[in-house]
């Protein structure tokens, strides 16, 4: 898998969030993206309506570039927690945020700011576009990461999915995951 190290300092993610049970993540996360499209993209892009404050903040901060996975469970990493709990009947939940890097300005009702830990982040590039996202996601955790012990994630760190581009059906659509590395 193609990868790079990206430094992020004093970054906040702005976005809309939802509590999702781990056992429902593979179903509920895509549904939540559907809600985002209906609330932000469809009215402004497809129906050509003037954006309201929520939609304006979404476009100004490129909400949709990232999905932040975080929770309040102490002494763990959301990435490894997700690997253990996704698909199980776990009652544990995580906060899933459809967001973008906050550039300043209005934080409208229905959006929140989420601080991101400063440091070096491992950015993994998936191949095959969104159609291959879940497969690549599983491969990253189960095969690639264990084969690369030089990349150790920080305990109590959030986990990011990243997306770039508009046509999520394109086979060359760019997406992947990011995790904060230990120093």
Image (cartoon, rainbow, N blue to C red):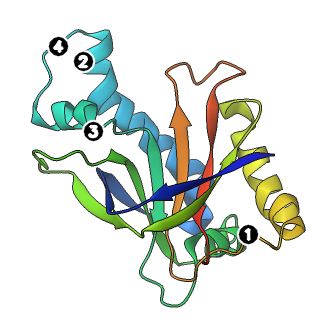
Question: Considering depth in this image, is 133 or 119 the residue closer to the camera?
Answer: 119
Query: Which tag is nearer the camera, tag 4 or tag 3?
Result: 3
Real-space Cα distance between discs 2 and 1?
Answer: 41 Å
Q: Are marks 2 and 3 in contact (CB under 8 Å)?
A: no
Sequence-wise first label, 1 or 4 = 4
Q: Is residue 50 above or below residue 96?
A: above
Label 3: few (<14), some (14–19) or many (≥20) C-alpha neighbours in 10 Å: some
- Give the left or right position of residue 132, taking residue 81 as reference: right
Real-space Cα distance between discs 3 and 1?
Answer: 30 Å
Q: Quadrant of residue 183?
A: bottom right
Question: Considering depth in this image, is 33 or 77 the residue closer to the camera?
Answer: 77
Sequence-wise first label, 3 or 1 = 3
Image x and y of residue 146, in percent = 85, 69
Q: Are marks 2 and 4 in contact (CB under 8 Å)?
A: yes
Sequence-wise first label, 2 or 1 = 2
Real-space Cα distance between discs 1 and 4?
Answer: 45 Å
Dot 2 corresponds to which residue?
44
At mark 3, the secondary structure is loop
The structure residue drawn at horizontal position 26% and vertical position 49%, both measured from the top left corner, is 102
Dot 1 corresponds to which residue?
151
Image x and y of residue 43, in percent = 25, 19
Q: Are marks 3 and 1 in contact (CB under 8 Å)?
A: no
- The label on residue 61 is 3
Query: Which tag is nearer the camera, tag 1 or tag 4?
Result: 1
Real-space Cα distance between discs 2 and 4?
Answer: 5 Å
Image x and y of residue 91, in percent = 54, 78
């Amino acid at each position: 898998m193609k990868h790079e190290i990206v430094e992020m300092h004093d970054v906040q993610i702005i976005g809309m969030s939802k509590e999702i049970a781990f056992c429902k993540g593979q179903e509920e996360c895509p549904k939540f993206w559907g809600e985002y499209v209906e609330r932000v993209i469809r009215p402004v892009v497809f129906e050509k309506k003037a954006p309201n404050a929520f939609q304006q903040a979404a476009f100004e901060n490129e909400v949709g570039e990232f999905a932040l996975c975080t929770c309040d469970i102490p002494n763990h990493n959301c990435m490894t927690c997700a690997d253990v709990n996704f698909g199980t009947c776990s009652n544990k939940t995580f906060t899933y945020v459809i967001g973008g890097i906050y550039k300043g300005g209005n934080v409208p009702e229905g959006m929140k700011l989420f601080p991101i830990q400063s440091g070096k982040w491992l950015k993994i590039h998936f191949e095959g576009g969104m159609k291959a996202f879940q497969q690549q996601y599983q491969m990253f955790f189960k095969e690639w990461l264990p084969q690369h012990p030089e990349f150790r994630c920080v305990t109590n760190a959030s986990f990011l999915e990243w997306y770039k581009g508009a046509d999520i059906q394109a086979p060359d659509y760019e997406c992947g995951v990011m995790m904060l590395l230990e120093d």
